[in-house]
């Protein structure tokens, strides 16, 4: 079953639970957050709140952690040194590239070679040995990896799953990787609860929180809790060019630049799910 419009009719309420109690300070996480390998990316912390977000997701340095769709590596620069120095295991996962439409052969080649290219790129970003970095597509998870992952982290990637009509297959593949007590943390651009489908169907980057929760529940997860760590009430969410109008992309370039910088990054839901029994 594809999510898209069909799930909208199936959801009639917004769900939330109190934030989970947080653990004490994690010196390894503090070290990773303060590391010079992050460079200018640390300037985005005021919008992305990585310390509070990772604590909410109950991420620990000795766990096996999957980062789904790491892209340019903003969170990778935090997670990879943190986990490598804590005795855990870091795994980068991208969506299945088969069946996708590509603009040209060069784009197809870049996409399909990502598992081979990512370890070297992440090693350059972080200084962690590329031999310690695993990168795979979601349909190529080794049999021995199934049921071994403690946390899967999905940062601002849900709209991509939906726009590519692959949300169900991707979420099920991720579920298969999780240990029985494993959990998934999601941060996603958030549409208003009463937004039209045009503004909340994913094409502009925004999704309704209730719909994301329902999507995970339909694919074998239980909703644990939500947090307002990454909320931004200044975000009006009605931009012609979607969420990419805001920083860091600033799709309109210099047009309205100061206005969008004053808004900051998007309003985001922060959700935690556990693998259903």
Image (cartoon, rainbow, N blue to C red):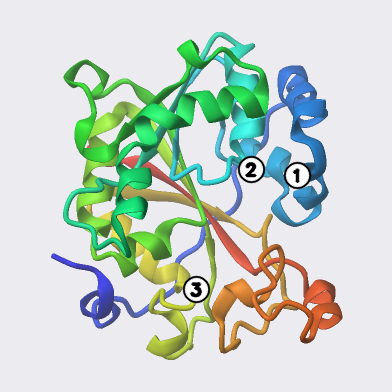
- Cα separation between marks 3 and 2: 20 Å
- Cα separation between marks 3 and 1: 23 Å
On screen, 135 above or below 236? above
Q: Is residue 268 visible?
A: yes
Q: Residues within 10 Å of mark 1 (few under 14, many from 20)?
A: few
Residue at image coords 61%, 16%: 128
On screen, 211 above or below 192? above
Dot 1: element: helix
On screen, 66 above or below 50? above
Residue 76, numbered circle: none
Task: Name the front one of labels 3 and 2.
Answer: 2
Q: Most extreme residue toward the top, as rendered?
A: 87
Residue at image coords 45%, 72%: 207
**43 relative position to 96: left or right:** right
- Image coordinates for residue 41, horizontal then vertical, percent: 75, 44
- Image coordinates for residue 221, horizontal then vertical, percent: 30, 47
- Image coordinates for residue 197, horizontal then vertical, percent: 38, 87
Q: In the rendered image, which quarter is residue 142 located in? A: top left
- Image coordinates for residue 137, horizontal then vertical, percent: 29, 37
Q: Considering the image in quadrants, where does the N terminus appear?
A: bottom left
Circles 2 and 1, Cβ within 8 Å, touching? The answer is yes
Residue at image coords 77%, 86%: 255
N-terminal-most mark, 3 or 2: 2
Dot 3: element: loop
Q: Which residue is mark 2?
A: 74
Q: Considering the image in quadrants, where does the C terminus appear?
A: top left
Q: In the rendered image, which quarter is residue 85 located in? A: top right
Q: Which residue is mark 1?
A: 41
């Amino acid at each position: 079953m594809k999510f898209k419009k069909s799930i909208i009719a199936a959801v009639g309420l917004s769900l939330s639970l109190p934030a989970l109690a947080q653990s004490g300070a994690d010196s390894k996480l503090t070290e990773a957050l303060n590391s010079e390998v992050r460079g200018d990316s640390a300037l985005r912390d005021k919008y992305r709140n990585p310390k509070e977000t990772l604590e909410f997701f109950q991420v620990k340095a000795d766990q096996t952690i999957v980062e789904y769709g790491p892209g340019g590596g903003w969170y990778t620069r935090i997670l990879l040194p943190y986990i490598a120095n804590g005795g855990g295991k870091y795994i980068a996962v991208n969506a299945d590239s088969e069946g996708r439409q590509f603009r040209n052969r060069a784009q197809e080649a870049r996409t399909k070679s990502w598992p081979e290219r990512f370890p070297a790129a992440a090693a350059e970003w972080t200084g962690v040995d590329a031999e310690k970095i695993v990168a795979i597509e979601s349909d190529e998870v080794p049999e021995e990896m199934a049921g071994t992952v403690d946390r899967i982290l999905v940062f601002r990637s849900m709209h991509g799953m939906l726009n590519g009509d692959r949300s169900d297959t991707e979420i099920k593949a991720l579920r298969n990787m999780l240990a029985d007590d494993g959990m998934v943390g999601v941060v996603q651009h958030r549409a208003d609860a009463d937004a039209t489908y045009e503004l909340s169907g994913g094409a502009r980057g925004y999704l309704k929180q209730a719909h994301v929760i329902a999507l995970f529940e339909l694919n074998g997860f239980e909703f644990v809790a939500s947090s307002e760590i990454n909320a931004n009430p200044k975000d009006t969410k009605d931009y012609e060019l979607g969420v990419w109008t805001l920083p860091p992309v600033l799709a309109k370039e210099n047009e309205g630049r100061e206005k969008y910088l004053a808004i900051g990054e998007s309003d985001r839901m922060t959700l935690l799910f556990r693998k259903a029994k």
